[in-house]
Amino acid sequence: MKSFGGPVLFLDRSDINTDEIIPAKYLTEITKEDLKPYLLEDLKLPGFDPKSDKTRNAGVIVSRANFGCGSSREHAPWVFEVNGQYVVIAQSFARIFRQNMFNCGMAAIELPADKIDLLFSFANAADAKISVDVAGQILTVTGAGRKESISFEMSPFDKALVLAGGWVDYADQKY
């Protein structure tokens, strides 16, 4: 079973596209595992290192609006999945990226800008963590001695996909 939570990687930018998540030159790799070392390789943000322990050890990604825009490729959620990052939280997602997350049994959580800002207020906490209760539709962020809980919306079908482990597991259970 996937764990929905862990240390947080804050990516403070809108419009992070699928080429930045997993560069197109790696789309010929044969397995998901082959994608693992290339996570966020082309993302340019001040102070960001795609090879850092902070990036590799994150369990949750927090970003701004229009996350996963660009080419519609399953490889973008796959590279998060193979790195154990099963939750992406953003103000909005590109439609296909968002659905690919749910299809893989991962949570794409949309929050309004003020709640995203609240999460980013934890960005300087070295111990920032987020735990997500998908069934209860609530996430809890902790760090630097602070704690906040935020409810979120998820359609019943998308929640069922996440809780089942993805579309294939859901279909195996239902059909």
Image (cartoon, rainbow, N blue to C red):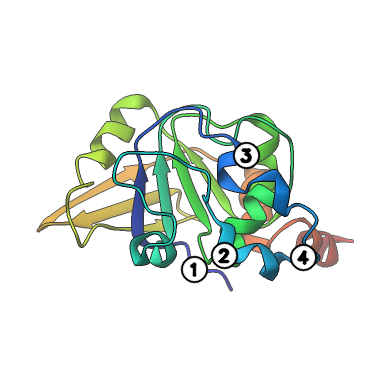
Q: Distance between the residues labelled 3 and 2?
A: 15 Å
Q: What residue type is labelled 2?
A: Pro
Q: Distance between the residues labelled 4 and 2?
A: 26 Å
From the image, which quarter does the N terminus lie in?
bottom right
Q: How far apart are marks 1 and 2 (CA)?
A: 21 Å
Residue topped by disc 3: 18
Mark in front: 3 vs 2: 2
Mark in front: 1 vs 2: 2
Q: How crowded is mark 4: few (under 14 residues within 10 Å), some or many (20 or more)?
A: some
Q: Kindly indicate whether the residue at mark 3 contacts the one at mark 1 (C-beta within 8 angstroms).
A: no
**SS assignment at label 1:** loop
Q: How crowded is mark 2: few (under 14 residues within 10 Å), some or many (20 or more)?
A: some
Residue ID at (50%, 60%): 85
Residue ID at (42%, 55%): 60
Q: Can see residue 103?
A: no
Q: What residue type is labelled 3?
A: Thr
Labels 1 and 3: the sequence-earlier one: 1
Q: Kindly indicate whether the residue at mark 4 contacts the one at mark 1 (C-beta within 8 angstroms).
A: no
Residue 37 circle label: 2
Q: Is residue 100 left or right of residue 174?
A: left
Labels 1 and 4: the sequence-earlier one: 1
Q: Which amino acid does label 1 sit on?
A: Ser
Q: Is residue 86 left or right of residue 28?
A: left
Residue topped by disc 1: 3
Residue 55, percent from left and from top: 40, 59
Q: Which of 91 and 13 is in front in this view?
A: 13
